[in-house]
Image (cartoon, rainbow, N blue to C red):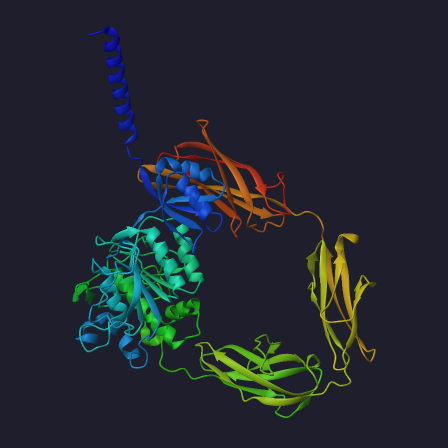
Amino acid sequence: MNKKLIFIAATILALVVFLVGLTAVAAQPLEMVKVLIGFDRQPGSSEEGIVRGVGGAIKYTYHLVPAIAASIPEAAIEGLLKNPRVTRVELDIDVYAVDAELDNSWGAQRIGAGVVHAYNKGTGIKVAIIDTGIDWNHPDLDANYKGGYDFVSNDNDPMDDNGHGTHVAGIVAAEDDTSGVVGVAPEVALYALKVLGADGSGSYSDVIAALQWAVDKGIQVTNNSYGSSGDPGVTVKAAFDNAYAAGVLHVAAAGNAGNPPGKGDNVIYPARWESVIAVAATNQSDTRASWSSTGPAVELAAPAVNVYSTYWDDIYKTLSGTSMASPHVAGTAALVMVAYPGWTNVQLRSQLQNTADDLGAVGKDNLYGYGIVDADEAAPSTNTPPNVAITDPVDGATISGIYRVKVSASDSDGIAKVELSIDSAPYIDIFAEFDGSSYYFDWDTTAVADGLHTLDARATDNLGATANAAQIAVTVDNVDGSPTVSITSPTNNTFVSGTITIKASASDDRGVNKVDFYIDEELLATDNTAPYECSWDTTIVADGSHSIKAVATDTADQTAADEVTVTVDNTTPTMHVDSITFSSKVSGPNKFLYTTVKVVDASVNPLGGVSVEMTLTHESGSSWKFAGNTGSDGTVKFTLLKAPSGYYMAMVTNLILTDYTWDTAKGLTSASCQLKDDGTVIQ
């Protein structure tokens, strides 16, 4: 063969081998990890673009928390953390299920739910079972099932393919229909939010989505019979906290990680968090199950051993676990909501605590919390309203000036508040005095026109019952009175700066002619029409204490004055770093190093919204730059994933907040620590 042809053939062969090699390299899949990416704002298309830009596949963009759930290349994590909009990247860890009618439901019978059913079955209260779904056509659940969503398969049919969720749902809401079992609250509106698959496992990203769905749909109670021993991170905690702040009551299994002596703190997540009620397990003898988790987070206990309830495929089954304890409390919460419809989730939670039957050590303890939940104590059938009456003035009286209205109120359950209304205006509950039996309200009658006016008082007891006093009518006569005037802004003994608006309210039966405003007894401005106000440039006076006076003159030239004292401070406020602390976490072979920076003002008050830039340097010379904004507590937390052992130096390089300057001579600018091989941190 010609040498030239041989060379060409060899070259082509080498090129083919090279291209095949490139193809083989390119075909190697990237190692993807499921993460929760926190942002410094509500994520939108721009933040989604950041995730997709690193090769990420988005699962959820949340509005309950400022975060996105996604799968991203593991190598992209470090780059994301350098983006100033990204506040944190956390692993989306796995979560797992914690594993004769009334006579068949010994748990519901034990907590007194059968007594409550005579007058209260939890009718209409929205309870969501966040679990493996619900067998919604089960004959003991179909009438109560109102809908839900399957976050595992992303569709509207959360049918249970495991059985755990259906068992939990039956404890809450099995129908009172003379067959099978009966739930604690057999007429609630039952919703299924499926976050666990057929194997009983799932991810926290789906849990956040379920909580967001619950808030959006007006769910009042969530039951969470699942969990993890590992902390799922700030984003998941924020989702539970935000949903709780929105009014949702969370009830969760404390976990089955306990030991026979009841030693240690082993409550699982999410039950471990303050915004969630952690429920421990008891048996038929009101004794803690030996496997029930223990610790300070345990809030209540409930039946959980050999509990017979509904199961998938239209059958019934006996199961044990704190998964069975939690729905007893969730069902009781629904009964309390019916009994006290005006209460918040915080008040309802206090009722569950205060009415629980104390077990174990006296008071709250780490095994039973406040004790075993008691449905008939928490949701009583009747509550006698308070006795309330207006005793001064009497009906038909003529009054004037500032009159002290006297209201008597009493109730065997104690008085929570007393309120007064004038002429059907909104009630006020700010009283001037309480002498042990009567409440006194100071009413400035000059603020209303002379003539006939009505007074109404109401009282509310500590259990929520409210009663109104008999309404009375009085005649106000202030025809010869002087005007009234009050400076409403700024308030007394406050700091002011820049240009402010001074505001005053003034009234008189004859009519107000004008309001004069004075600074340190010098006339500043006059306003002839309501609302009475003027502008004051505080920079024209020296910093320090100054008086503001408003003088109202009526059409008969009668005057009245009000005066406040303010402190002018036009200096630029400062801020500084109060602390730099380190912590760590071990996850499998990897160590995570957390650096928390706290920013305060000159008075050491936490500052939120401060843009913090920080450089973290390892003894090897490697360094990482971070940026993020402080929260309302003044702190921002930075995460170094796959942190190598050794010595670290954290250096704060910049603090930015509008109208503030960084006082670098005060507080800290750097701190160091050692991350040991076992993951512990020495600072």
Q: Classify 264 as above or below 471.
A: above
User: What residue is rendered at 46% in x and 45% in y?
Assistant: 46
Q: Classify 666 as above or below 182.
A: above
User: Is there any visible trace of residue 8 in the rendered image?
Assistant: yes
Q: Is residue 241 left or right of residue 525?
A: left
Residue 225 in the image: x percent, y percent?
Answer: 29, 59
- Viewer-side residue, 6 vs 35: 6
Residue 246 in the image: x percent, y percent?
Answer: 44, 63
Q: Classify 443 as above or below 566.
A: below
Residue 72 in the image: x percent, y percent?
Answer: 36, 41
- Viewer-side residue, 591 vs 611: 611
Q: Is residue 571 left or right of residue 362?
A: right
User: What residue is rendered at 38% in x and 82% in y?
Assistant: 382
User: Is there any visible trace of residue 288 in the rendered image?
Assistant: no
Q: Is residue 142 left or right of residue 380?
A: left
Q: Is residue 399 left or right of residue 467?
A: right
Residue 478 in the image: x percent, y percent?
Answer: 73, 85
Q: Classify 643 as above or below 382.
A: above
Quarter of the view holding residue 311: bottom left
User: What residue is rendered at 28% in x and 51% in y?
Assistant: 202
From the image, which quarter does the N terminus lie in? top left
The furthest residue to the bottom: 396
- Viewer-side residue, 199 vs 96: 199
- Viewer-side residue, 377 vs 423: 423
User: What residue is rendered at 39% in x and 52% in y?
Assistant: 236
